[in-house]
Amino acid sequence: MSVDFVFIDSGKGGIPYMRRLLEICPAAECVYVGDSKNFPYGEKSKQEIVNLVTELCQKIIQRFDPKAIIVACNTMSVNALDELREAFPDVKFVGTVPAIKLASSLSQRRKIGLIASNSTVHNDYNQKLQQEFANDCTIISRGDTELISFIEKKAYSANKQDILDACKNAADFFAKSDVDVVVLGCTHFLNIKEEIQEAFGPDIKVVDSVDGVVKHALQVVDIDFFKQPVNPVVIMTDKNDL
Ligand code: DGL
């Protein structure tokens, strides 16, 4: 079996990324693998993340022979993208990193918020992004494992008010910090982007990396746009074996 794309994440974070790609290109053959058995990645060391994601990709490559692996997880990308490219030189990888460049182009106050996993907010990669694209900005970061876990475990069955309540601590945090743009630096947040924007209010613009990642994915793989669409295969490692 050979597919166009395999999307990977620690759970449900990459699903909005795959959905967006399929909206643009319904003919793309996609597989989704959420490593929910090892969720949350954001509380693990770099070495643990590298080991887990390398093992995951090894199995994915053997089983699905993808044209590209979309690492739809900031935590996996900032910790392990270089190592993955080195371990599997014949495979194309598309990573997901916080949209600091986009935030910098929008911030009037030159104060940007970043909400992500603890591992991502402490990763040096952010310093590099800031130096390159937002040198004159202050970045206020918040690692929010609680909200990420809520999304993984509860958001799909929660009502709107529960989701808005879950966003309240983060909304209060950024309201106090005077930022005018907040970057969603964890793909899980895309599952509740509308509620996050509503909770943060009209003075804060919430931005993400979905469009950039999907565009890049469609550039690296040649899709036969006339193929009959097929439903994506979805695997969650706490329920299905890879
Ligand atoms: N979805 C992942 C990300 O984009 C993080 C979730 C986790 O901590 O496992 O960083």
Image (spheres, rainbow, N blue to C red):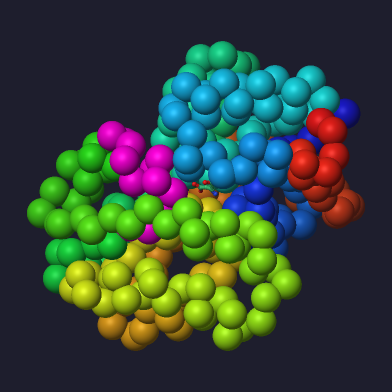
x 79%, y 20%: residue: 62
Q: Position of residue 126 (x, y in %)?
A: 29, 42
x 56%, y 44%: residue: 40
Using residue 21 as the reference point, say whether residue 214 is left or right of it: left
Using residue 128 as the reference point, say whether residue 71 is left or right of it: right
Q: Is 44 located above or below residue 224 in the figure? A: above
Q: How many discs mark residues in the rendered view?
A: 0
Q: Nearer the viewer, residue 46 or 182?
A: 46
x 53%, y 57%: residue: 148
Q: Quadrant of residue 218?
A: top right
Tell me, yes or no, whether the highlighted magenta stretch contains residue 110: no
Question: Could one spot residue 127 in this view of the protein?
Answer: yes
Q: Position of residue 125 (x, y in %)?
A: 31, 36
Which residues, given as a range, are shown in magenta? 114-125
Q: Quadrant of residue 23?
A: bottom right
Q: Position of residue 193 (x, y in %)?
A: 52, 70
x 76%, y 57%: residue: 26
Using residue 13 as the reference point, say whether residue 4 is left or right of it: right
Question: Could one spot residue 5 in this view of the protein?
Answer: no
